[in-house]
Image: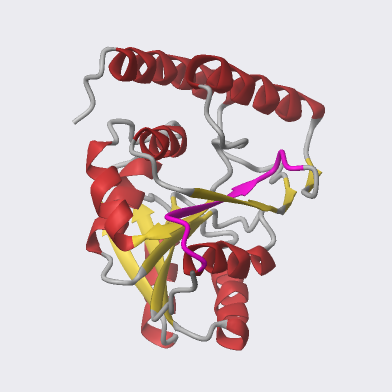
Amino acid sequence: MYKKILSADIIIPVYNEEACLQKNVLILHGYLSKVADFSWNIIIADNASSDNTPKIAAALSAKYNGVKYMHIPVKGRGHALRAAFLKSGADIVCYMDVDLSTNIRYLKLLIEGIACGFDISIGSRLMQASRIKRSLKREIVSRIYNSIIKLLFFNKFSDAQCGFKAMRNDVARHLIPMIKNNNWFFDTELLLLAEYYKYRIFEVPVEWIEDIKTKVHITKTVIEDILGLLRMRFTIHKNKMP
């Protein structure tokens, strides 16, 4: 079943990204200008940056049609995504990382998944067709983490944490207010909620290159993720979902 997509908001959560923000937003802007057959906006969702990110984002918004800037006064990637999702009036809301670790040519596949009738589309670095370049340490951590999720929840999706996702606006408005985490566990919690409520998830193989300058602190993130999984397991097991 094909559904006509009229509009999409592509959200880019940022925190202190002055080094790459302008270059990568313009790459994305150029790509969408060439391939999109729907109206679109790039939403730069800044969560309390302390460098020149706000100034650069505001300048991009003023100069380029289709670029919008949102300032969220608190740190936390989830805060930025939550605010941008719930403000959006587009048919589809997407998000991706500002470093463009995921090749943007796969964005079209994400949106086509929704057009074909799925509720959520996600990039997966663990599909056989995906092409990935990252350190052995991060590869092992990722595979162990996703294996733990399957042991606890018997979920169908393969990659919980790829920052490359899209969903229908009504799905976002249902799920986002229920997400408790405002950091890196946000992605996992979103997908676990989606499966609990039986939303259809479409997985897209991607080309992904690790950003060696990533701000993700692996040890801290692993602890946060494990605690989040235990919280979600207890909540779902006890049927305490809203």
Magenta highlight on residue 126: yes
Residue 42 x, y percent position in the rendering: 44, 72
| Residue under the image location 55 percent in, 57 percent down | 98
Q: Is residue 186 above or below residue 104?
A: above
Q: Is residue 166 left or right of residue 50?
A: right
Front one among 65 and 82: 82
Say whether residue 68 is visible.
yes
Q: Is residue 111 above or below residue 154?
A: below
Q: Is residue 128 left or right of residue 93?
A: right
Q: Quadrant of the C terminus?
A: top left
Which colour assignment does the render follow? secondary structure
- Residue at the extreme left of the image, as rendered: 242
Count the marks: 0
Q: Is residue 234 left or right of residue 28?
A: left
Residue 90 x, y percent position in the rendering: 32, 72
Front one among 47 and 156: 156
Q: Please provide the residue range marked out in magenta.
A: 116-127
Residue 138 x, y percent position in the rendering: 71, 29
Magenta highlight on residue 170: no
| Residue under the image location 36 percent in, 42 percent down | 78
Q: Quadrant of residue 60?
A: bottom left
| Residue under the image location 43 percent in, 79 percent down | 4
| Residue under the image location 62 percent in, 87 percent down | 34
Q: Quadrant of residue 29?
A: bottom right
Q: Is residue 88 above or below residue 73?
A: below
Front one among 212 and 96: 96
Say whether residue 21 is visible.
no
Residue 186 x, y percent position in the rendering: 40, 36
